[in-house]
Image (cartoon, helix red, strand yellow):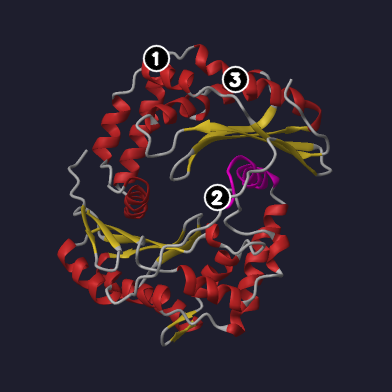
């Protein structure tokens, strides 16, 4: 795995630039994380950040919505916007020679968006369509609602928003959120590709250096939802969500936690797939994933099954989660390492994956882990290490949510 040269600089206004030059590619990608995500939504206005994010790309500085989109398209930018808990994230990839003009446009988007009133209803309507589509996708909805019940608010609030709150959100709500939240201090700009650090430093200083700091925001933490709950939905299917405590990304035992979840749900040879789906034929889909906030983590598990077999699916799945602490085979850990190696190699070849990863690392860790460091940590894992983690953080105190016609309870 090639040597990585990751360089960072924090500007006077608090914006941190994190750069990974990649000499063997022709592209460059960026991931710009700006404070303003859903944890800052006003009470009973969950979805304000989503509406704001939609509005910000509908014109900035001297560009109206049509010209802004055309200019980015002419630069060959493959782009996306995402609302998270803490951040609004603007990402994109293009040819390396086009990165500078792209960043100049995004400097306008995050500092000087038009937030046009005439586009507000269309922006809010787009968010509403996304939320209504989720109503028809209970497989996704059950995990979103599971987070609401296993994390304290506002961290558990749906980042896309809530249908019941949309009518309370106005153009003034979006503008107030922008004025209150978006700031350079705590913002992170991750860049990876065929780039030179010194040139980027000068460019970012020129385009983002005059962005004024704002006070860091505080918010009140509320309670999580019930640990056992059902959303009634008449159907022949039942969707099951299960959550339990894990460690966050910054914890020294994170890679042991990752390995434990990978043994449960890392492919067609994983335990949940082979035992619950293949051997018993209880469900058509099942998986588990490790989810991390800055200071806490959860394992989130999903199973989709028929209503008739839902209770058995829940009981067997819980049993498999608990049974992990009874023992792990060396071959199971070997398969985890093989999957991780493939993933690392693919990430090494992707500028958009690296720009996102280095920005995420800076947020969670205040530093960047190299791919070699990740590989070494995974290679160093032993069965004893992973088992010690599982026994110190056993699957228990579950949060369980189901979507279906009948409530379920663990046996």
Residue 332 spot, x, y in % from top left? 43, 19
Instruction: Characterize the magenta stretch by its predominant secondary structure.
Output: helix
- The image quadrant where one finds the N terminus is top left
Q: Which residue is mark 2?
A: 155
- Residue at label 1? 330
* Residue span colored magenta: 138-154
State which mark lies toward you, 1 or 2: 2
Secondary element at tag 3: helix
Q: Is residue 152 magenta?
A: yes
Image coordinates of residue 310 in percent, x first then y, are 75, 29
Is the residue 398 above or below the residue 39 in the image? above
Whole-angstrom CA distance, mark 1 to mark 2, is: 37 Å
Callout 3–callout 2 Cβ contact below 8 Å = no
- State the residue lying farthest toward the left: 198
Q: Position of residue 78 (x, y in %)?
A: 41, 64
Sequence-first disc among 1 and 2 = 2
Q: Residue at x 34, y 53 (%)?
A: 359
**Residue behind mark 3:** 320
Label 3 vs 2, first from the N-terminus: 2
Camera-side residue of 76 and 143: 143
Can the viewer see residue 72? Answer: no
């Amino acid at each position: 795995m090639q040597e990585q040269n990751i360089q960072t600089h924090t500007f006077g206004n608090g914006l941190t630039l994190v750069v990974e030059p990649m000499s063997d590619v022709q592209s460059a990608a960026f991931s710009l994380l700006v404070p303003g995500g859903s944890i800052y939504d006003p009470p009973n206005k969950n979805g304000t950040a989503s509406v704001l994010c939609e509005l910000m790309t509908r014109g900035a500085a001297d560009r109206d919505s049509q010209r802004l989109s055309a200019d980015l398209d002419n630069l060959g930018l493959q782009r996306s916007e995402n609302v998270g808990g803490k951040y609004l994230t603007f990402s994109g990839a293009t040819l390396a020679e086009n990165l500078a003009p792209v960043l100049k446009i995004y400097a306008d988007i995050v500092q000087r968006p038009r937030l046009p009133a005439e586009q507000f209803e269309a922006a809010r309507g787009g968010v509403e369509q996304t939320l209504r589509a989720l109503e028809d996708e209970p497989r996704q909805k059950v995990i979103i609602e599971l987070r609401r019940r296993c994390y304290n608010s506002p961290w558990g609030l749906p980042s896309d928003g809530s249908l019941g709150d949309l009518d309370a959100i106005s153009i003034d709500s979006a503008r107030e959120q922008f004025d209150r939240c978006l700031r350079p201090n705590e913002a992170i700009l991750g860049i990876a590709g065929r780039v030179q650090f010194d040139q980027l430093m000068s460019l970012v200083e020129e385009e983002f250096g005059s962005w004024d700091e704002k006070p860091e925001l505080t918010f009140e933490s509320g309670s999580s939802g019930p640990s056992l709950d059902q959303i009634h939905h008449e159907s022949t299917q039942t969707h099951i969500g299960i959550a339990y405590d894990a460690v966050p990304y910054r914890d020294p035992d994170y890679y042991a936690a990752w390995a434990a979840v990978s043994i449960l749900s890392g492919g067609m040879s994983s335990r949940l797939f082979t035992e619950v789906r293949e051997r018993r034929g209880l469900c058509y889909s099942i998986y588990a994933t490790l989810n991390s906030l800055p200071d806490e983590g959860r394992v989130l598990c999903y199973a989709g099954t028929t209503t008739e077999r839902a209770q058995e699916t829940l009981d067997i799945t819980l049993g498999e989660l608990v049974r992990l602490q009874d023992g792990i085979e060396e071959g199971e850990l070997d398969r985890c390492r093989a999957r991780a190696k493939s993933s690392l190699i693919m990430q090494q070849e992707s500028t958009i994956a690296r720009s996102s990863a280095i920005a995420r690392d800076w947020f969670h860790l205040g530093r960047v882990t190299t791919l070699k460091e990740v590989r070494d940590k995974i290679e160093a894992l032993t069965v004893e290490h992973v088992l010690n983690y599982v026994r110190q953080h056993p699957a228990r105190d579950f949060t369980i949510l189901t979507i279906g016609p009948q409530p379920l309870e663990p046996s």
